[in-house]
Image (cartoon, rainbow, N blue to C red):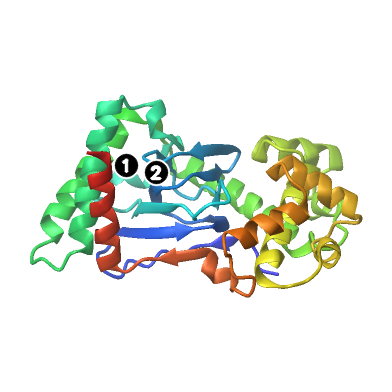
Amino acid sequence: MATADYEMVRFNKLKHIKFLVNRISMRKEHSHNEFEIAVLLRGKALMTVEERTFELNEGDVVFINSSEIHSYRNATFGDAPIFLFAQISNHCFYDYFPEIRTTVFESCMLSDFYKRDELDALKAILFDSAAEYFSDKPRYQLPLLSHVAAVLNSLYTHVPFAIITEKEKGAAKARHARMERIINYIDENFESRIRLQDIADMEKLTPTHFSHLFSSMFHVTFQNYVTHKRTEQCVRLMAQTEKTILEICYESGFSDPKYMNAAFMKEFGCSPKEFRLRMNQRSLDLHQSIDEFEHIFSFEESNQILDKYRQSIH
């Protein structure tokens, strides 16, 4: 069973800056050291950043602070949503603005802090940045760096942030490390019997203390989180195999089909059988690999998608 991902962002084209256009059906919990800006270009999506879940519609923009655990999934039974992502290292422009390394922004929907015309202006800069990044033009680095500096300045102007000390940064890293240990343990064990007591022992906490800590970290109870992971695994098995609903139920860690049915009704508003039928109706290949839940477009395809998106909003 794969654990929660720590993503090592590879800056293959330009140091500290990366743009990509992705189609994502499901992306499990992961984190990375870079700031991330996600613009939903098409479709509807649910995005969870640690304790908060955002419902995204076309044109929405989310900012994720460095090292925060986040995930994405399709919010409908239609085509998978398409995002433009900007990933910016917290060492970008460090020589000129060293505070960037210890800046902690509030992860948020940018519409919470931007007026509509301000957000449209920011998206225009992001699209221009991406166009430069995906191009083969000479000296593309100069306008791109200018655009990214403008994006960062805009974030510092609009989004709440704090400049923390190195000691505080270390404490924040320790908290994120604990969260990752807990997520990894659940990922490795939810398919079988999993007990809150076992994780509490691992973290050297009493069960009561751990239960409160878990709820404060994830804003959901331990049992509800485990149920969500089992439901997520059911969806993966439906996409990857032709196993029966009963087989999928037990292989995902549910002790009884009625619990699986209740979990699907709560999360998707339908039974597992109906959910699978809807998947088939949208022609999702039941033999596809888990990697196919995410597709990164080529530079040429990305520019074409961005051009069509620009035309659709004018």
Badge 1: few (under 14), some or many (20 or more) residues near its Cα, within 10 Å? some
Amino acid at circle 2:
Thr
Q: Residue furthest left?
A: 138
Structural distance between the alpha carbons of marks 1 and 2: 6 Å
Which residue shows up at 54% across the image and 70% down it? 291
Q: Position of residue 146 (x, y in %)?
A: 15, 48
**The image quarter in which residue 240 lies:** bottom right
Task: State the residue position of label 2.
Answer: 102
Amino acid at circle 1:
Glu
> Is residue 251 positioned above or below 269 on the image?
below
Q: Nearer the viewer, residue 236 or 52?
A: 236
Badge 2: few (under 14), some or many (20 or more) residues near its Cα, within 10 Å? some
> Is residue 265 positioned above or below 118 on the image?
below
Which residue shows up at 29% across the image and 57% down it? 305
Which residue shows up at 85% across the image and 42% down it? 207
Q: Can residue 15 be seen in this view?
A: yes
Q: Residue furthest front?
A: 281
The quadrant of the picture occupied by the N terminus is bottom right
Q: Is residue 160 left or right of residue 133?
A: right
Task: State the residue position of label 1.
Answer: 99
For the residue labelled by badge 2, is the local secondary structure a helix, a strand or a loop? helix
Q: Is residue 16 visible?
A: no
Contact between labelled residues 2 and 1, with CB atoms less than 8 Å apart: yes
The quadrant of the picture occupied by the C terminus is top left
Q: Where is residue 307 in the image (x, y as percent from the top left)?
A: 23, 53
Q: Where is residue 190 in the image (x, y as percent from the top left)?
A: 79, 59
Q: Which of 60 and 63 is in front in this view?
A: 60
Give the mark count.
2
Q: Is residue 129 left or right of residue 52?
A: left
Q: Residue furthest top?
A: 115
